[in-house]
Image (spheres, helix red, strand yellow):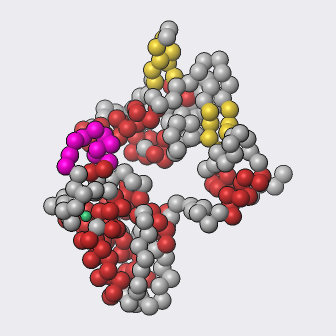
Amino acid sequence: MEIHQEGWPRFAENVFDRVGDGAHVKFRQHQWCGETPLRRRFPELYCLASNPEASVKDLASFDGTSFSWNVRFTRLVQDWELESIADFMDVIYSVLPAQGVIDTICWKLSSQEVFSVNSFYTSLLSPTYRSYPWKNVWKPLAPSKVNFFIWIVSLGKVLTLDNLQKRQLVLTDWCCMCKEAGESIDHLFLHCHTARELWDLVFSMFGLRWVMPCHVVDLLACWTGQNRRSRSDAIWALIPHCLMWIIWRERNA
Ligand SMILES: [Zn+2]
């Protein structure tokens, strides 16, 4: 059988593991809890894993009727990592393995969770299909801390007020830039009056009219370097990084 590796990521993102005893499911590499494999969802913790290749079964600890995860890290956790650890624990305790049950591989695109060529073909034709815009997130010319920040923003994990409230932190729900209610990532960086003034200023400098997408990741995905009216593609390509970094610095000033 001929295997086309180019299409593998599109296939793999529609597959998930239903955990039985976890013997055939890699704890960090496979998607078995939540929408994303733990390795991709918590890259900062993956670097610290003492056994990065462990299976779910390797880390599952049954003691009579009680269950716990035997997850270890290569060093003590720092203060600034506690937030990630709390999220990580929430996610892994959302699914528990079952002793004596075989793991199964499931297909997201059909209601029976069984692969069919038709369902996969239909998904490939869908205009909403979108791969993650890595090339527009990681820019060689941008400082690494800015690249990292944009990456976190695109994943929706920056601690704007809506994300803090999800963590049960009670805060006044208002955007400190425009003084109106509802500070979400997409509001703060794209749709807030203050942000829009900055974006519109840039677009007018490039002689563009722009319909702002709903989400940051959509903006990054369509921010290609094909704008022939700009003098420099290199400058154009860094605008989202520059503006969102400035907005975040100002927001926290
Ligand atoms: Zn605002």
Residue 43 is covered by the magenta coloring = no
The residue depicted at 37 percent of the width and 38 percent of the height is: 87
Quadrant for the C terminus in the image = bottom left
Question: Residue 209: percent from the left, percent from the top?
Answer: 41, 84
The residue depicted at 72 percent of the width and 52 percent of the height is: 119
Q: Is residue 56 left or right of residue 194?
A: right
Q: Is residue 148 visible?
A: no
The residue depicted at 33 percent of the width and 87 percent of the height is: 204
Q: Is residue 33 left or right of residue 208?
A: right
Question: Residue 51: percent from the left, percent from the top?
Answer: 49, 32
Q: Is residue 242 visible?
A: yes
Q: Is residue 181 left or right of residue 156?
A: left
- Please tell me whether residue 244 is drawn above or below residue 76 in the rendered image: below
Question: Residue 220: percent from the left, percent from the top?
Answer: 45, 68
- Please tell me whether residue 127 is drawn above or below residue 23 in the rendered image: below
- Identify the main secondary structure in magenta: loop
